[in-house]
Image (cartoon, grey):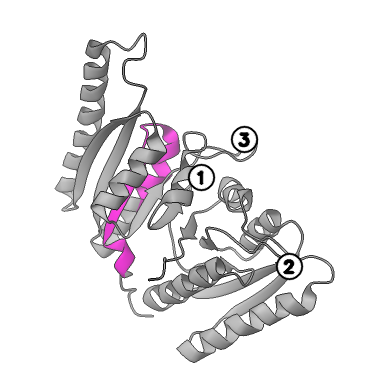
Amino acid sequence: MADPSSPASWHKLLVCTDGSPASQGALRAAHNLARTFGSRVWLLEVMQFIPGFAGLSPEFVFHWHQEVEQRLNALQAAWSHEGLSLTPLVRQSASAAAAIVQEARELEPGLIVMGRHGQTGLARLLMGSVTARVIGESPVNVLAVPREARLAWGRLLVASDGSAFSDAAFAEALDLARSLNSTLLAVTVVRENEYPEAQAILDRLLAQANRRGLPLTTLLVEGAPDDAIVQAAGRHAVDLIILGSHGRTGFTRLLMGSTAERVIGAAAGPVLVVKKREEG
């Protein structure tokens, strides 16, 4: 098998950290991409606080900012010794999600890489709902990486409900499979009386893959969408799950609202959320 070539979206990365262990998966994934594909990395930490908030003196904020800069600069130096490109960014904002999205709009990376907290409560993500908000508002794809996860691309799983958002995820999955020499599994989740429509979705995906000359395995599974996707990923030893950011308002509601968030929160490995490009 030939060495994989780098997807264009991985040449320029915005990686988010909050300095906690939950960020380690994202940092490790970024390091992997930088070493393997020569990706340039901008490492962003947002100091989230309300300016003028009682108890946060200017002196405290100054020293906090210095500590963050020193930590990021140390990472920059370590990466530089390996010949890797890392640019530290420190921002202050009342909203971490808004600051991340704003930085993405200005920097125009191909991908945002974020961490994730552990599997607690309703599968909340890094810094509470920050990852969910970033996914909703980001102009680019978002890769969410659990703390202990390792980024690999031998076997990819893409979930589809036939929506335009899922179509965008499938198109990205086909591009990644070709670039990275990955095997690809397409999953559709079905509830009762929906089998013909669900099978039609998989048939359409298979036809698209055949036209690209790419092998595709299809899988029809029952259950709650998020649980079914995560369980399928585990059974088939998937390295990366690929989802659209939203789903249909019709039969399965595969990726509407909190489903993508639950998949990210429960999955053992990285999850790539693909944004549908605006037309016009």
Q: Position of residue 211 (x, y in %)?
A: 50, 91
Q: Secondary structure at mark 2?
A: strand
Mark found first going from the N terminus, 3 or 1: 3
What range of the chain is rendered magenta? 8-29
Please give the residue where the numbered disc 1 appears in the rendered image: 132
Q: Secondary structure at mark 1?
A: helix
Callout 3 crowding tier (Cα within 10 Å): few <14, some 14–19, many ≥20: few
The vertical placement of 73 against 10, above or below, is above
Q: Position of residue 192 (x, y in %)?
A: 84, 67
Proximity of marks 2 and 1: CB atoms separated by less than 8 Å: no
Closer to the observer: label 3 or label 1?
A: 1
The vertical placement of 280 against 231, above or below, is below
Q: Is 146 placed left or right of 220 in the picture? A: left
Please give the residue where the numbered disc 3 appears in the rendered image: 120
Q: Amino acid at mark 1?
A: Ala
Q: Amino acid at mark 3?
A: Thr
Judged from this view, the residue extending furthest toward the right is 193
Residue 150 seen in the figure: no
Q: Amino acid at mark 2?
A: Val
Residue occupying image coordinates x 57% and y 48%: 261
Residue 46 seen in the figure: yes
Callout 1 crowding tier (Cα within 10 Å): few <14, some 14–19, many ≥20: many
The vertical placement of 276 against 107, above or below, is below
Q: Secondary structure at mark 3?
A: loop
Q: Position of residue 48 (x, y in %)?
A: 36, 28
Looking at the image, which is closer to me, 263 or 57?
57
Report if residue 11 lies within the magenta region.
yes
Callout 2 crowding tier (Cα within 10 Å): few <14, some 14–19, many ≥20: some
Please give the residue where the numbered disc 2 appears in the rendered image: 221
Judged from this view, the residue extending furthest toward the front is 280
Mark found first going from the N terminus, 2 or 3: 3
Report if residue 231 lies within the magenta region.
no
